[in-house]
Image (cartoon, rainbow, N blue to C red):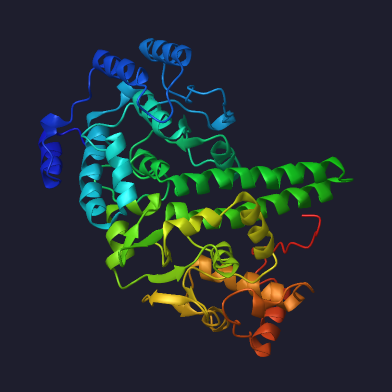
Amino acid sequence: MTTDRTELNTIAARHGISLTDVVPVAFEQRMVELERCLGRTDIPFPIAADAGKQYLETARQGLPFAIGSLSEVMVDLGQYRNAQRYEDYTLEEHLSWACLIAEQQRTKSRYACQEYLDGEALFAIGGTTIPDFYLLNARIYQQTGWQLATVNMIIPAELFFTCHSQRFFPVTTFMRPLEQDYLQEPDIGHDVAGHVATFTIPVVAQVMRNHGVARNMIYDRRDELLASASDAAQQASIRARADELLLYAERIYWFTVEFGLVMQRGELRAFGAGILSSPGETKYSIDSPKPTRLLIDPSQDSDLLRLATTDYLISEFQKTYFVTEKFELLESLTPERIVAIAKRAAKLPHFSWRDVAPGDTVLNFGEAAISTSEKYLRLISQQPLDDCVTRTAIRNLRMIGRGLQADVDLDRCWRAPMVAIPTAILEWFRRVDAEGQFSSQVLRPLSNETW
């Protein structure tokens, strides 16, 4: 990071900020504000007096914020536990927040859905300094019943959704480098400035919680099967099955909570935190001709299955966005339905993030879009493919080559029948795969009906 004030002034001015405003609120003043906040009763989730008193005392002692403690529930983060040491943030880190927020607010005001903007105003997400998690956590709890849990890195999906089941949201404590728009791993700019406002959209918050409950259903069943497993190989298979099911549930989360678009008054608007935390991707997701945009009705199994069977990458802007017709349709994403769709997805061929399939309702056919069969032709002709397209093609060819399960009827899974893979391609693939050309790719088709 730079420490030259002249350069910092130049960076600040470039984003319409005065460096003199990038000054954290003093500790004592933050404590006064926290005490005032904890005493509020005109909110949906008032904080019990005893819990608020202990919470305030912990903050006053200068102990770093780790996990919200305003309710009777708790979550174990294990090795991923972290804490926010607020006084340790540098001027450059606060300026990075200020610059990102300034750019986010410009794009959010134009492209975010109204419910998201209302939520952001409620928490006063913005300003020129990184939020103190003690105060932010109290405000979040009072409005939504959710709390923050600080982590030290990207955590496993299993733990991420465990947190959701208890209404905890994992947040990191580091800030991206100055003027970096897009980041593969979550930082405060994503976790706080991207996600917090979504907690106030009731149906989105419920989808988040439902994914946590779905995780519990999957892993409770895993534990039941492990209890009667006879050997290590069987135990490993059971664990792999659970992780695979959660992967497909996670894709539903990815294309809604993280990268979802919604129609409002005849226009596209963003509500996904992954989109709105990146000013560049916010504009790209709605205005750019490059990505494909598909209209979906999540209450229809065929459309929800489309999400669960679509692979993606996190290394760049998304190639396909799914547009929900209206928020109310997300109410259909119950835990039971998420798990049921994940089980079906495990038995089916999948789509890459570039695929446009028969039956898709296409709002925009992106510049990177391909047909469902084109990936196989590119694979056989050794044309350049990204990792998502490659692994999807290999998975599908292996699965279809080995034969689908008897209860799978591809013509009834989506809105229209898929184009059959030519026999010549399947025969070519069997030969080269047997020779070990794709040995690093692993396929785990779900076959255990007890799941």
Indicate the quadrant where residue 400 lies.
bottom right
Question: Quadrant location of the N terminus?
Answer: top left
In the image: residue 274, left or right of residue 239: left
Task: Report x, y in % for residue 349.
Answer: 64, 72
In the image: residue 8, left or right of residue 40: left
Q: Residue at x 80, y 47 (%)?
A: 235
Task: Report x, y in % for residue 42.
Answer: 35, 26
**Nearest the camera: 347 or 183?**
347
- The answer, for residue 313, to whether it is visible in the render is yes
Task: Report x, y in % for residue 381.
Answer: 54, 84
What is the number of callouts on the image?
0
Compared with 384, 258 (above or below) is above
Indicate the quadrant where residue 249 lies.
bottom right
Q: Residue at x 65, y 52 (%)?
A: 336
- The answer, for residue 156, to whether it is visible in the render is no
Indicate the quadrant where residue 198 lies.
top left
Question: Quadrant location of the C terminus?
Answer: bottom right
Q: Residue at x 61, y 82 (%)?
A: 417
In the image: residue 294, left or right of residue 161: left
In the image: residue 208, left or right of residue 89: right
**Nearest the camera: 272 or 113?**
113
Most extreme residue toward the front is 42
Most extreme residue toward the right is 230
Q: Residue at x 68, y 83 (%)?
A: 426
Task: Report x, y in % for residue 373.
Answer: 55, 82
